[in-house]
Image (tube, rainbow, N blue to C red):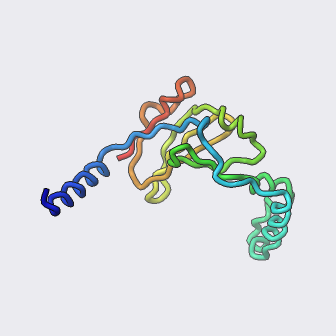
Amino acid sequence: MNPSRLVFCLLFTGAVAATAGEKLSCPDLATATPVGNCPRESDLQYTFTGYCSDDRRMYQQDTAVCTDYQEYRKLKNVVPWESADGAFMAYLSCELPADRIKAARASQVAVSRQGKITILACHYDQGITFTHRSRRECTVVGDGHCAVDPTACRASCE
């Protein structure tokens, strides 16, 4: 085959694949994994002192989380998790046991926009939300409620 025809075919195939609609389903959290480690208590105490002693923050009256170490700990004691395919992610509390996260079932899917980015949010019980970010336009397939059938939590992205 002519090398220029081969290059054209490869480019054309990629262009067709990029324009075809992509179907996304909310991930099964049984296969989700943490991407990092939870912060140690000593790290949280150290960063609390540094974060809350920032003068700029004090002058802007952005001190609500600095009034109580437990509030700060609740905000910062998180670890990123991602779906098995890496398409969805969430920052989850280190207080939530991994077995409860893995047992959570999808109940709702929603799409929103933030500037030019589409955010596909999969909501689970336990207050867990995994998100997928894309520059594509996405729409929810169905009404978005899928507590009865978690496999119905789907979206189509163009």
Q: Residue at x 56, y 35 (%)?
A: 28
Q: Is residue 90 left or right of residue 24?
A: right
Query: In which quadrant of the rendered image does the N terminus lie?
Result: bottom left
Camera-side residue of 142 and 47: 47
Q: Residue at x 39, y 52 (%)?
A: 136
Residue found at the far bottom of this picture = 55
Camera-side residue of 120 and 92: 92
Camera-side residue of 49 and 38: 38
Q: Is residue 132 left or right of residue 45?
A: left
| Spot occupied by residue 73 in the image (x, y as percentages of width and height) | 81, 55
| Spot occupied by residue 102 in the image (x, y as percentages of width and height) | 65, 36
On screen, residue 18 above or below 148: below
| Spot occupied by residue 27 in the image (x, y as percentages of width and height) | 53, 38
Residue found at the far front of this picture = 1
Q: Is residue 48 left or right of residue 144?
A: right
Q: Residue at x 52, y 48 (%)?
A: 86
Residue found at the far top of this picture = 148
Place residue 2 in its image quadrant: bottom left
Q: Residue at x 68, y 47 (%)?
A: 92
Camera-side residue of 57 and 44: 44
Place residue 8 in its image quadrant: bottom left
* Callout count: 0
On screen, residue 69 above or below 85: below
